């Protein structure tokens, strides 16, 4: 990466609002980035000695981008009656990717503070993300995934008409070998046909900094984000159910049966490579607050200070359309074969820190993750279609989770600092889910839980020493 930035204000040329006490500030710059990937497979992988399905080729490729950008902060008015500050923010970036092509991104924001105690802010942001080298050049190869082929066996649970949607002929019906343990063959890997993701973000919020309560801040921001041309993979259970039940041509194109009708061979599989799938929208409210109390204010001279910090997010909705034109489904508060990892509607962190004048710091943090329900029990056709309408009683709900973390540090002289801590003090185990009996896709978790959401290591202890030279 090579980049350069030039920034400053424009006071010398007199570019300043007559109602503002500050001139316009600008930043201009340019950047060049290059990413490359090279993956060489060993002989035992290429021969299929370890994978069982045969190896895949290596990966070799690179992307580069040339960019130029400009940003400006324009004070419109300030230090006036009912207008403590009124600032306009502008930004524009032009990007030229060697594979993805040209992209223009930009943003505009406005901050209005009628007084020092209160301010309002809002903005719009157009962003883009070009596919990464892994998403582009990951080698394609055969793997397996959990899905029930309702058209297999001598007594299929799906009708001939339904199975015909997935490519089954009348001669193949009742003569198709079932996928072993409900694990069918999948084709995974990257794709050079990927287009960049694009997003539009709208925000509006308020910030309170009351002078009557010094060292206290509170902010709340509403957000609405829509991402189009999502880069990802379609869950194979969703592809299968949508083709089987709705004959959707997009999903049916991902079902590739072999000459016998099987989905469990090297020529019979479900496509699960990276593609531009559809769109995602989410909205909610972010809340943040901080407060610092010098202990001298309550009669504890030289005792230090006590600080509190709170960050929380309420997710109103998280709607996903796996394919343009396909009705979106809302995964807020759900998890499962279609929605993937749990998406609780509320989660927060609350931290309290005691810092003494002698350099001792003690901190306790409360991590809260709200409850989630399994999507296949909601009654939605998109959700329960992956199991043929069957529900999951055992995994119906993951309860709310609370974790407590303790950390501390101590300055030792002028050069050293000792720190230690315990995460998940009460050794809370992660939730265990077992939906393999439903024959659904379990790739959204890691075996039987969700390491990206919950603490899977249990209680952990750390200690460290820092030194300044």
Image: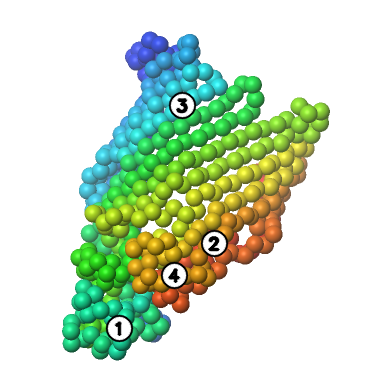
Q: Residue at x 23, y 54 (%)?
A: 325
Upstream in sequence: badge 1 or badge 3: 3
Of badges 3 and 2, nearer the viewer stands: 2
Q: Residues within 10 Å of mark 1 (few under 14, many from 20)?
A: some
Q: Eyeballing the image, is 261 above or below 319? A: below
Left or right: 353 in relation to 152: right
Upstream in sequence: badge 1 or badge 2: 1
Upstream in sequence: badge 3 or badge 2: 3
Judging depth in this view, the residue of 444 and 390 nearest the camera is 390
How far apart are labels 1 and 2 at the CA level? 33 Å
Q: Position of residue 191 (x, y in %)?
A: 26, 63
Q: Kindly identify which residue carries mark 2.
A: 398
Q: Position of residue 388 (x, y in %)?
A: 35, 72
Could you tell me if the residues under marks 4 and 2 are in contact, i.e. CB atoms within 8 Å?
A: no
Q: Kindly identify which residue carries mark 1.
A: 156
Instruction: Give the number of callouts.
Output: 4
- Which of the 4 image quadrants contains residue 235? bottom left
Does any portion of residue 254 appear in the rendered image? Answer: no
Q: Look at the numbered disc 4 and give the secondary structure of its residue.
A: loop
Q: Kindly identify which residue carries mark 3.
A: 120
How far apart are labels 1 and 3 at the CA level? 61 Å
- Which of the 4 image quadrants contains residue 90? top left
Upstream in sequence: badge 4 or badge 2: 4
- Which quadrant would the C terminus be assigned to in this image? top right
Judging depth in this view, the residue of 447 and 380 nearest the camera is 380
Residue 391, numbered circle: 4
Does any portion of residue 228 appear in the rendered image? Answer: yes
- Which of the 4 image quadrants contains residue 324? bottom left
Q: Look at the numbered disc 3 and give the secondary structure of its residue.
A: strand
């Amino acid at each position: 990466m090579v980049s350069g930035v030039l920034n400053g204000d424009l006071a010398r040329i007199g570019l300043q609002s007559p109602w503002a006490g500050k001139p316009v500030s600008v930043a201009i710059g340019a950047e060049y980035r290059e990413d490359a990937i090279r993956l060489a497979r060993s002989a035992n992988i290429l021969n299929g000695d370890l994978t069982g399905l045969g190896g895949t080729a290596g990966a070799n490729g690179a992307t580069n981008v040339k960019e130029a950008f400009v940003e400006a902060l324009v004070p419109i008015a300030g230090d006036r009656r009912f207008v403590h500050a009124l600032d306009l923010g502008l930004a524009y970036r032009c990007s030229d990717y060697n594979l993805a092509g040209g992209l223009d991104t930009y943003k505009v924001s406005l901050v209005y503070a009628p007084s020092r105690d209160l301010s309002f802010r809002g903005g719009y942001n157009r962003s883009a993300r070009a596919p990464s080298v892994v998403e582009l050049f990951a080698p394609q190869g055969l793997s397996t995934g959990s899905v029930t082929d309702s058209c297999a066996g001598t007594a299929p649970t799906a009708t001939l008409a339904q199975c015909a949607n997935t490519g089954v002929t009348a001669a193949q019906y009742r003569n198709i070998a079932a996928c072993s343990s409900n694990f069918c063959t999948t084709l995974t890997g990257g794709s050079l046909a990927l287009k960049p993701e694009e997003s539009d973000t709208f925000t509006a919020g308020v910030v309170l900094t009351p002078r009557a309560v010094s060292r206290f801040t509170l902010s709340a921001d509403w957000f609405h984000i829509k991402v189009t041309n999502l880069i990802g993979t379609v869950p194979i259970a969703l592809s299968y159910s949508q083709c089987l039940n709705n004959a959707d041509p997009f999903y049916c194109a991902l079902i590739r049966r072999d000459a016998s009708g099987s989905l469990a061979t090297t020529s019979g599989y479900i496509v699960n490579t990276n593609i531009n799938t559809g769109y995602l929208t989410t909205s909610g409210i972010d809340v943040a607050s901080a407060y610092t109390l010098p202990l001298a204010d309550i009669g504890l001279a030289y005792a230090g200070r006590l600080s509190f910090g709170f960050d929380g997010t309420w997710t109103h909705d998280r709607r996903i359309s796996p394919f343009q034109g396909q009705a979106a489904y809302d995964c807020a508060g759900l998890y499962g074969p279609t929605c993937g990892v749990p998406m609780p509607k509320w989660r927060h962190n609350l931290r309290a820190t005691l810092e003494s004048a002698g350099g001792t710091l003690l901190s306790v943090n409360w991590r809260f993750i709200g409850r989630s329900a399994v999507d296949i029990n909601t009654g939605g056709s998109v959700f329960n279609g992956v199991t043929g309408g069957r529900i999951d009683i055992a995994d119906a709900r993951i309860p709310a989770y609370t974790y407590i973390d303790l950390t501390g540090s101590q300055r030792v002289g002028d050069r050293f600092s000792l720190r230690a801590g315990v995460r998940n003090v009460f050794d809370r185990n992660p939730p265990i889910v077992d939906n393999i009996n439903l024959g659904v896709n379990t790739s959204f978790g890691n075996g039987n839980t969700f390491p990206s959401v919950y603490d899977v290591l249990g209680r952990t202890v750390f200690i460290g020493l820092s030194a300044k030279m």
